[in-house]
Image: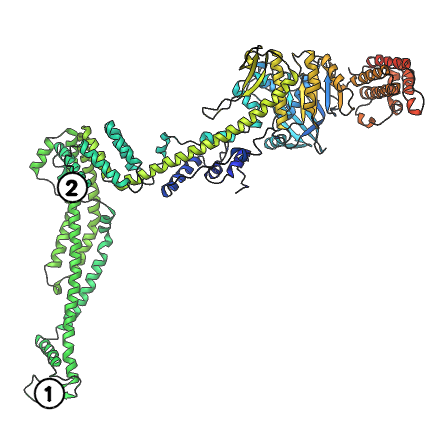
Amino acid sequence: MNDYVHPTNDQVLNVLSNVEGIIGQYVRRYPSKNRTDVNPRWLEDWFLERTKYLLEHPELVEISSTNLDELLEGIIINQVSVVKRPVTIVSLWPHYFRGFKNPPNPTNLTGKLVVIEGRNSTGKTSLAEAFEWLLNGQLVRRSFSDMGDAKELESCIGNQLKPEDEQTWVETHFLTTSDEPFKIKRLLIQDYGKEKSSMAESEFYVNDKMLNRQEEETFLDELFAGIPPVLMQHSLRTFVLSTPRQRRDYFERLLRLDEIADLIEKTVVGDARLIEFPSPLGSVAWKAWEDLKARVPQEYRRPLKRVEQSSRESITPDTETALTNLARALFGITDTTLSFDETKRAVELIQQQKRAISFPLLEALRPKKTIDPQLLALFSEKSTEQDVNDLEKRHQVLIETYKAAEKIGSTQLIISQTLEQLSEIGVVVEKAENQSCPMCEYDTPTLTQERINKIRSWQPIQQAEQDAETKYLSSVGELIIKINEFVTAREGLIPDPPIESEWSEAVNCTSDPVKEAASKCGMALQGCIISVKTFDEVCEALITSLSGEMPRNHEIPKIKIHIANLNASLGIVIDKAHEYLDNFTALENAVGKQAREDPDYNLREVWLSLVGNIDGITSDFLWEQSKKKAQEELEKIRLFLLATREKIIESRRIAFSDGMTGIWRKLRSDPYSSFSRLFIPPAKGKGLPLEIEIKAILDDGTRQIEVDALRVFSESQINILGIAAFATRSKLIGHRLIVLDDPVQSMDEDHFKTFCGQLLPELLGENGQVIILTHNETFARELSFAWGDKDDDYYVTMSIDHTRKLGCTVEEGSRRVSERLKRADKYVENGDLEKAWLAVRRAVERLYTLIRIKHGEQGFDHLSWRNATAEYMWKQGVKDIVSAKAPDATKRLEEIVVMTAAAAHDKMPYGATDLTNATSFVRQLVPKLKIGG
């Protein structure tokens, strides 16, 4: 079996389910951590089945020694991508969400690195939270108890100034790795309430089709593995400042150990639980054995425990020997030559003597017969049915043979016998025609063959009479035997009452509880004797009828009436026997309770219950041994699962730790305190909770020590560690898109450079997309220096602002214009005027695009101008806008465009002075046209 998929579809359990032998069999029985539609006693059922199997096949199965590295190949790797459909974002459109009101168009976020600048309180966090809420329907800030009071965060999703007829929603367009576009939208149904436990409610749409909750989770799980790739300002330090157990949740999607942890937790059947698995016989003998061990002195328990481990072949004789030795040691059995059975009888005699002290008549009142299935069969109404039928049939045959024999006299029988003798000696010749009879005086041929045959027929009739009588008497004898069995059984079930003097003496010399029970038992016995009197009389009459007359004189109808009366009273006998037994048992219990005040008596009782059930104790011993073996196997399975879990945890820890270390070293070079590693101590306790500790290295130049990072890290170091954790998780999960809300808090300018030059390339990779929101002008400038020479569809700048009338607005920023103008200045310094004028032309084209976006008609698609010339843009509306907004700049802008085109028309480019004047003019024009604000 190599393709079994576990019901949980858990990657680890899928692998373990396909391990050959008992491990795979066991893992396949495990349903799931959260499933409630399966047998909740799956472990108990498995353990019981395994015990039964080991009872028949006592050899333990070797647990697989499979190399865990080979077994978990594909799971134990440093890079584990769990995102199934990586995506990048195209646009984001918040509608009456937090600081946003009603933007006429979505914010276009096309680009690999998108930088959105804005002052504090202009809506950067609102924009990031719009994306966060879109992906999980909740806001992190509302979930964190230290971020404000629930009442103060009531209705924190919708814009507080939203008109009654408007709705709150966020819509986003995405692209998959195959450039497949799709749209998702979340519509607010119910905002947060005042209670801390209240949750926001919303509807989720994909391409305008609403999904249910399960469909939504499945869909987003494919895109982001259930984790929004957004690092907010207020969640930057979450990982570092969480408890060790909470940090485990941060990497939950990468660990994916809930199912195996739950399985490990359940893979235990401790000694205390073994009692939950009694043998098929009920473990009666085992309970008595445990009782015996608990009662005997400590020095006698060890031999008894050794017996429990005896082999199948020796367990019965070992048990008998141990019990015999115990009786000799504790019960005063001094004769060491007594056998096991003889020892048993000796102890029984001791018990009888002890009970006799309390009530001497107990044994005389004890039923000598037990009401077992064999006796119940004897007392069934059908037990005499066949006997009566046989008796009646044989008596009929007997009567018929009597009638036939009555026609033949005794003289005729003598003649028949004499003929046989004469035939034997040859006097009478067989088959002769006619001959004289040798017994007659006359010599007359009167002995014909016909006469011979007739004489011979007389003797068989007589023989038939004898045979019929023999068979009938046999039936009579069998019926008498059965009636005697009835009589004997009845006497054994209901004994004769003792004489009055013995009874009075016995009752008067005992305790009140025994006296009361004896009185009830005596009354019950008298009642039973009266009730079965008819039965006794019928039995006696039957025996008399069957044995006191000649067979020919037996009156079968009368006998059948007696038997009918007998059958009618059989049930009464059994009912009365039960009634008497109940009363006698109550008496015996009362006597025993009085006797059991002596602990030695109790101990002997337990001992006797065991020696009377050797087969039971043997079976229970073997069952207990099988349970121990099943327990041992289960512990081996658990150790294997623990080793598997630890192997995966260590692999994941290395991946997390190495990833964070790499990012830390890119951003920090602290000589004294630095991030060392993530440390995961061995799990222990219920549920095997996994904890992640953060370690730092302190280095004073002479020695290094490892300590908990929170003891020594500064606020800046904690923030960078938060970035490292977030970036590592996103990379390992496989996020293609990452959104960072002011990620450089507490960083200095040197770290801005390392963030832009070293961390961002790693986050972007080959196909990644990073969106950065920042209010820090210095950080934005460093981003521009590091990435400003990239193409327009690679590095994109946006600006965000907030006004009372419009709320938050996001626009194409002017940074690309200034960056291209700076590039032109550098080309001038290097003497490359042709490239400088080309940079100016690109800056002007960028400016024209921004003018049209900012001041043109709604719904303008700036991508349609991607390949358009500046002249075309000018004619298609930009000239009119500039004429209205800055009329004195119209002519100068046209001149600059003409100058930038000189080199393209085989003309010498204009000089450095003209170029410098052109860049200065464009720079001054940007704020006049309110671009980027």
The single residue placed furthest to the right in the displayed view is 907
Seen in the picture, residue 474 relative to 294 is either above or below; the reply is below
Residue with the mark numbered 2: 527
Residue 509, given in percent of the width and then of the height, sits at 10, 30
Q: Residues within 10 Å of mark 2 (few under 14, many from 20)?
A: some
How was the colour assigned to the protein in this rendering? Answer: rainbow
Image quadrant assignment for residue 466? bottom left
Quarter of the image with the C terminus is top right
Residue 75 horizontal side relative to residue 52, left or right? right
Query: Which residue is denoted by mark 1 in the rendering?
Result: 436
Disc 2 to disc 1, C-alpha distance: 80 Å
Residue 878 visible (yes or no):
yes
Give the mark nearer the N terminus: 2 vs 1.
1
360 in relation to 801, above or below: below
SS at badge 2: helix
Instruction: Give left or right: position of 460 versus 285.
Output: left
What secondary structure is marked by label 1? Answer: loop
Of residues 120 and 754, the one drawn nearer to the viewer in this rendering? 754
Amino acid type, label 1: Ser
| Type of the residue with mark 2 | Gly
- Residue 714 position in % (x across, y down): 60, 11
Looking at the image, which residue is at 92% across and 17% down?
910
* Whether residue 519 is visible: no
Tell me the residue at 51%/29% (across/down): 645
Is residue 786 toward the left or the right of residue 732 in the image? Answer: right
Q: Residue 94: percent from the left, percent from the top?
A: 70, 22
Q: Residue at x 63, y 16 (%)?
A: 720
In the rendered structure, are the residues bearing label 2 and label 1 in contact, judged by CB atoms less than 8 Å apart? no
As rendered, which of 753 and 622 lies closer to the eye?
A: 753
Nearer-the-camera pick, 542 or 214:
214
